[in-house]
Image: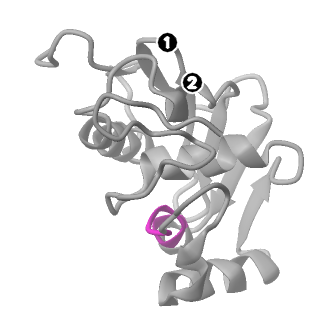
Amino acid sequence: MGSPPGAYVVSHYDPATVSTLADTMATLLSVNLAGRRPGDRAIQRIRRPIGLRSRDDGATATIVFGTHQIVISNALINQPPVLIEGGSDELAALLRLQLRGALLPVGLATRDGARVLTAIVTRRLTVRGLLRHPLTIVCFLAVASLRPVSALNGFCGAPRGDTHRRF
C-alpha cells in the first residue's frame, strides 16, 4: 500500500466481498490515522473488537485494532464485546461527536449530540458494552471521529507533537 513506513495499515479481512459499512470505516480510519505512529496511546487503548451494524441495509463490520494494523471484517466475528447498532443517520451523528479532555464528550451539547442522545433514549441507536467498556468506546470515537479533534490529550492520550501526555 502507499502508507509511509511506521504508519498504521487499514486492511479488509476479505477484500473480495467488502460491504459499504466496512469500506466507509476503512476509508475514515485511513484518513484519520494517516499521521499517527504505531504505539499511539489512543489506539493502544482499544483492546477489544468493535462491531458495527447498520439497521438500514443490514450491513455489519468488525474492527480489530492491532499494534501496527487495523483489520476490518465484513461480518460480526465472535460476538464483539462492543456493538454499535443503528441507522446510517444515527451512526453518522455518533461519528461526528467531538471529544475533549479525558472522558468529556462536549459534542453532546451540539445538534448532533442531541440527535445521538435522542436516538439512544428511543433505542434507535444501541451501544452494547457502554457500561463495561466505556474507555474503549470513547477512544474509538476519538480515533474514528469525522471531525479532527484538536484536544484528544486526555484519557486516550493522543500525542501533541512528539510527546505523550500522562494522566
Q: For the residue marked with disc 2, what is the amino acid?
A: Gln
Please identify the quarter of the rendering in which residue 79 is found: top right
Q: Which mark is residue 67?
A: 1
Q: Are marks 1 and 2 in contact (CB under 8 Å)?
A: yes
Where 130 sits versus 76, above or below?
below
Furthest residue toward left: 2
Where 93 sits versus 18, above or below?
below
In terms of secondary structure, where does tag 2 sit? helix
Please identify the quarter of the rendering in which residue 6 is found: top left
Question: What's the magenta region?
Answer: 91-97
Q: Which quarter of the image is occupied by the N terminus? A: top left
Q: For the residue marked with disc 1, what is the amino acid?
A: Thr
From the viewer's perspective, tell me whether residue 70 is left or right of residue 42: left
The CA span between labels 1 and 2 is: 7 Å
Residue sitting at x 63%, y 45%? 155
Please tell me how crowded label 1 is: few (under 14), some (14-19), or many (20+) other residues with Cα within 10 Å.
Answer: some
Residue receiving disc 2: 44
Q: Which quarter of the image is occupied by the C terminus? A: top right
Q: Is residue 94 magenta?
A: yes
Residue sitting at x 28%, y 41%? 27
